[in-house]
Image: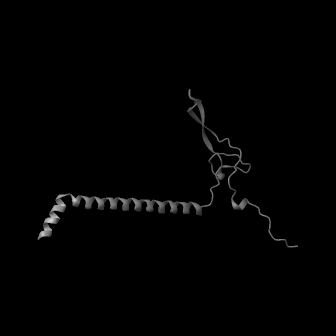
């Protein structure tokens, strides 16, 4: 029966609070590390998906290759600034034609020509 007094004294001295706080701290650390691992897995999955996709043929004007004709001129409608404030920031816009002159992005494989590597002579 003497051990009951020791347990009672332990609880009265705040020993249980110390044990409980140690447990809470361990669970917080475990949760934080688990969330970091999940975030790493999510980022890795997104990077793998991005690596599997072929490059989008997008021009420097941010428009797709389909918006450009054979000469490279863009035919997309854009918002052109027409008025500026004292800090030279546009305040009014009107519809206009994109002014980029040529698409310079990755060429689709159907338009790439490669010479033969072997010599048949």
For the point 12% across and 69% down, the residue is 2
Q: Position of residue 90 (x, y in %)?
A: 57, 33
Q: Position of residue 111 (x, y in %)?
A: 73, 59
Residue sitting at the far top: 86
Q: Is residue 98 left or right of residue 13?
A: right
Q: How many marks?
A: 0
For the point 57% across and 60% down, the residue is 50
Q: In the image, is residue 105 above or below residue 5?
A: above
Q: Position of residue 116 (x, y in %)?
A: 80, 67
Location of residue 96 (image quadrant): top right
Location of residue 25 (image quadrant): bottom left
Q: Is residue 47 left or right of residue 121?
A: left
State the residue in front, 42 or 116.
42
Q: In the image, is residue 89 above or below residue 59?
A: above
For the point 48% across and 61% down, the residue is 40
Residue sitting at the far left: 1
The chosen color scheme is: one colour
Pick the quarter of the image with the N terminus: bottom left
For the point 65% across and 42% down, the residue is 98
Pick the quarter of the image with the C terminus: bottom right
Q: Position of residue 28 (x, y in %)?
A: 34, 59
Q: Is residue 23 left or right of residue 83?
A: left
Residue sitting at the far right: 121
Q: In the image, is residue 46 above or below residue 119?
A: above
């Amino acid at each position: 029966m003497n051990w009951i007094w020791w347990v009672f004294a332990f609880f009265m001295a705040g020993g249980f609070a110390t044990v409980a706080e140690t447990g809470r701290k361990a669970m917080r650390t475990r949760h934080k590390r688990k969330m970091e691992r999940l975030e790493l897995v999510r980022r890795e999955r997104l990077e793998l998906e991005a690596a599997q996709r072929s490059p989008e043929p997008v021009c420097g004007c941010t428009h797709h290759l389909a918006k450009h004709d054979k000469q490279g001129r863009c035919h997309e409608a854009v918002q052109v600034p027409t008025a500026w404030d004292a800090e030279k920031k546009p305040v009014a816009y009107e519809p206009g034609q994109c002014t980029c002159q040529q698409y310079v992005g990755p060429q689709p494989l159907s338009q790439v020509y490669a010479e033969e590597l072997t010599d048949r002579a």
